Amino acid sequence: MSPRGSGQARQRRATLADVGRHAGVDTSVVSRVLSNDPILNIRDETRERVLASVSELGYVVNAAARSLRTARTGTIGLFIPDFANPVYAEIISGAEAAATARGYALVTGSSGASGATPQTYLDLLGQGRVDGLLLAGDALTPAVRKALDEFNLPYLLLNRKMRGSHRFVVLDDEKAAGLAVDHLVELGHTRIAHLAGPAGADTAQRRRAGYLAALKQAGLPHDPDMVIAADYTPEGGVAGMTQLMKLRSRPTAVVVSNFAAAIGALGAARASGVSVPGEVSVVTIHDSPLAEFLVPSLTAVRMPLEELGRRAVDRLLSRRFDDAVEEVVTGPIELVARRSSAPPPAGSKRKAAK
């Protein structure tokens, strides 16, 4: 007997009208929200209510029909520096959730081991194969920007600002670095170093600014030898921490700009015979589920990475191509204290004051 004859009713797929009734809006509003009509003038709460109804009812956009009707592909691209960096997993998760809620697919690529560039992906995707592009890291070179302009392709920088571009969504990196320093100051540290990330990285510059501002607020001097540029990789953390541990008057605490680099910093301290947190405390910007299982477990500033991904997709799809988008995702940002941070060794404050 066929499933139809078994008496089991096939579940009816939700329609635009169903979504409209559920959200309390006209069907045309639902359609325009899902097609990201740039001239649709509705409240953010209404837009969010429509998207919530789409998700709750399981409404699925007919991508083929929409493509024929609107000349859109229903696909957006996200280019990141490295899939191995756990920070990007959360960003991708948030971006994918937001894209799916709007009936879009997310295509993600990276430079990583392949050495691909944003230009490579633009060449592969070709004109008209995606409806927009999110660029993380140092992806927006002059050549890439020229190609984006030629394709008339909307883009947003993801947690990066760049001179001449007014389209970005970033995290409050200054606040994050400040929270890390404040935590260490409260523990009694006065010699606080900073593994600041690559010298040319916008995120590194913002985190360094937050670190310096927090030192000044605490009345602590800035020692240039205590700020080391370090790549956002475990290898970068090893190199930077090794350099700090060789200082004649070494720090009792280190704020690391990136989770991957912090893993390397812990390894370098261990290899140098330096106890964490007995001799030096370590705090990182960005948290990860892995932090709880490191030895010692890693104190971290938790950032709204998923919200960054969601907000970037929302702004990419809801704003005009030439609209300025200059947004800072301010929270929630919180410090998660674990075993890698503790009061400084006995006598360290006396030595620092000499």
Image (spheres, rainbow, N blue to C red):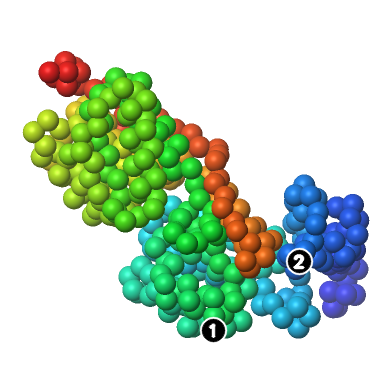
Q: Position of residue 3 (x, y in %)?
A: 84, 74
> 164 or 354: nearer the eye?
164
Answer above or below: position of 337 versus 354: below
Asked if residue 260 shows in the view, the reply is yes
Which mark is in front, 2 or 1?
Answer: 2
Q: Position of residue 92 (x, y in %)?
A: 52, 59
Give residue 126's mark. Answer: 1
Q: Secondary structure at mark 2?
A: loop
Q: Secondary structure at mark 1?
A: loop
- In screen coordinates, is 7 left or right of 33? right
Disc 2 from disc 1: Cα separation:
23 Å
> 227 or 251: nearer the eye?
227
Give residue 37's mark. Answer: 2
The quarter of the displayed image where residue 37 is located = bottom right
Q: Residue at x 32, y 29 (%)?
A: 215
- In screen coordinates, is 261 left or right of 322? left
Looking at marks 2 and 1 on the same chain, the residue that comes earlier in the sequence is marked by 2
Asked if residue 265 shows in the view, the reply is no
